[in-house]
Image: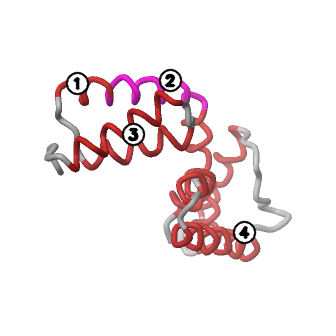
């Protein structure tokens, strides 16, 4: 069970737009998340969509005190990953700007990789401004014309 993917379904959905296979994978992961929520969360340990610092700590404490309780481990790990995604989203605008600057420098140096192509695609999907679409197109073209592949 990949908690990181389950915790970040919004990004999975964003990256799946326009691709039927990826969209099917998203729907499958969403159904898996729903199943996990229904099977492992209850009134005593509810699935929360917002985060309070004490809730995650209480899940962690309960999971540590009950190592044989599979539901406790699943609840803690899923909510921990969701909290990490929530925290990362707070600096998303800064991350986008840094990614854009990094990609621009790599394009000027002619040193782009497959990882850069994925980063450019994500940037273009998050914010489809003309600049971001041009960066994605240029990274893709540079790779096709013999850029460094990793």
Q: Is residue 32 magenta?
A: no
Magenta residues?
90-103
Secondary structure of the residue carrying tag 1 is helix
- The disc, 3 or 2, on the residue closer to the chain's N-terminal end is 2
- The disc, 1 or 4, on the residue closer to the chain's N-terminal end is 4
Pointer 2 local density, CA inside 10 Å: few below 14, some 14–19, many at least 20? few
Q: Which mark is residue 94?
A: 2
Residue at 49% across, 39% down: 124
Look at discs 2 and 4 and give the one toward the viewer: 2
Secondary structure of the residue carrying tag 2 is helix
- Give above or below for 133 relative to 47: above
Q: Badge 3 is on which residue?
A: 136
Pointer 3 local density, CA inside 10 Å: few below 14, some 14–19, many at least 20? many
- The disc, 1 or 3, on the residue closer to the chain's N-terminal end is 1
Residue at 66% across, 47% down: 56
Q: CA distance from mark 3 to mark 2?
A: 19 Å
Q: Badge 1 is on which residue?
A: 108
Q: Badge 4 is on which residue?
A: 37
Q: CA distance from mark 1 to mark 2?
A: 21 Å
Secondary structure of the residue carrying tag 3 is helix
- Residue 90 position, x and y percent, is 60, 30
- The disc, 1 or 2, on the residue closer to the chain's N-terminal end is 2
Regarding residue 114, the answer to whether it shows in the image is yes
């Amino acid at each position: 069970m990949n908690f990181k993917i389950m915790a970040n379904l919004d990004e999975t959905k964003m990256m799946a737009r326009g691709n039927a296979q990826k969209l099917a994978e998203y729907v499958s992961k969403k159904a898996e998340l729903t199943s996990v929520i229904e099977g492992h969360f209850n009134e005593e340990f509810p699935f929360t969509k917002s985060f309070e610092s004490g809730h995650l700590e209480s899940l962690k404490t309960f999971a540590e005190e009950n190592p044989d309780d599979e539901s406790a481990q699943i609840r803690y790990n899923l909510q921990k990953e969701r909290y990490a995604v929530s925290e990362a989203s707070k600096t998303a605008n800064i991350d986008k700007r840094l990614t854009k600057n990094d990609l621009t420098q790599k394009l000027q140096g002619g040193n782009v990789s497959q990882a850069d192509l994925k980063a450019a695609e994500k940037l273009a999907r998050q914010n489809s401004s003309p600049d971001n679409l041009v960066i994605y197109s240029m990274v893709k073209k540079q790779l096709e014309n013999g850029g460094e592949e990793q």
